[in-house]
Amino acid sequence: MKAVVKVGGKQYIVSEKETLLVDLLPEGTKELTLDAMLVIDGDKATVGTPLVKGVAVKAKVVEDLVKGDKLRIIRYKAKKRVHKETGHRQKYSRIQVASIGK
């Protein structure tokens, strides 16, 4: 069974016992109950308007703070002596889907 859930403004396709990285959740969050927007069970698909009634996805936070890859942003103009370099490193939370169902 698979479901489409919305976490932090982004939609993810999840299945049971799957781990995924989502945007950093508020500190102290241990468990999540997410509403399903679409449920796929074998050949049968149920589309919500906007949510599927009676179906909830339960997930738990495995790791609170996971740092993503470092991105280097370079601003450079040839022959003008302009060179500026900055970096960014996104912070994520790792969650594991416990169950999909009622």
Image (cartoon, grey):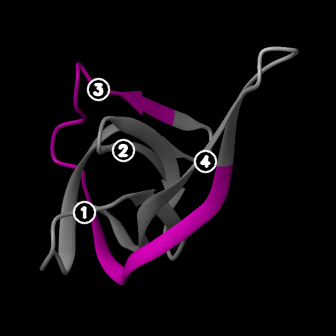
Distance between mark 2 and mark 1 Cα atoms: 15 Å
Which is more toward the observer, 77 or 100? 77
Q: Whole-percent x and y of residue 22?
A: 42, 57
Please give the residue where the numbered disc 1 appears in the rendered image.
Answer: 25
At x 51% / y 70%, what residue is drawn?
67
Gap in angstroms between the C-alphas marked 4 and 2: 18 Å
Q: Which residue is drawn at 16% across and 47% down?
A: 54
Which SS does the magenta portion mostly show?
strand
What residue is drawn where x is 62% and y is 38%?
A: 43
Q: Please give left or right for residue 57 compared with residue 88 in the image.
A: left
Task: Find numbered disc 1 in the image and state the secondary structure of the residue it sits on.
Answer: loop
The C terminus: image quadrant: bottom left
Q: Mark 2 points at which residue?
A: 5
Element assignment for label 4: loop
Q: Where is residue 97 in the image (x, y as percent from the top left)?
A: 41, 70
Amino acid residing under circle 1: Leu
In the rendered structure, which segment of residues is drawn in magenta? 45-71
| Camera-nearest label, 3 or 4 | 3
Q: Earlier in the sequence, mark 3 or mark 2?
A: 2
Horizontal and vertical percent position of residue 59: 31, 71
| Depicted 90 relative to depicted 59: above or below | above
Q: Label 3 is placed on what type of residue?
A: Gly
Tell whether label 4 touches label 3 (CB within 8 Å): no
Q: How far apart are marks 3 and 4 (CA)?
A: 17 Å
Residue 15 against residue 31 in the figure, above or below:
above
Are the residues flagged by discs 3 and 1 in contact, CB closer than 8 Å?
Answer: no
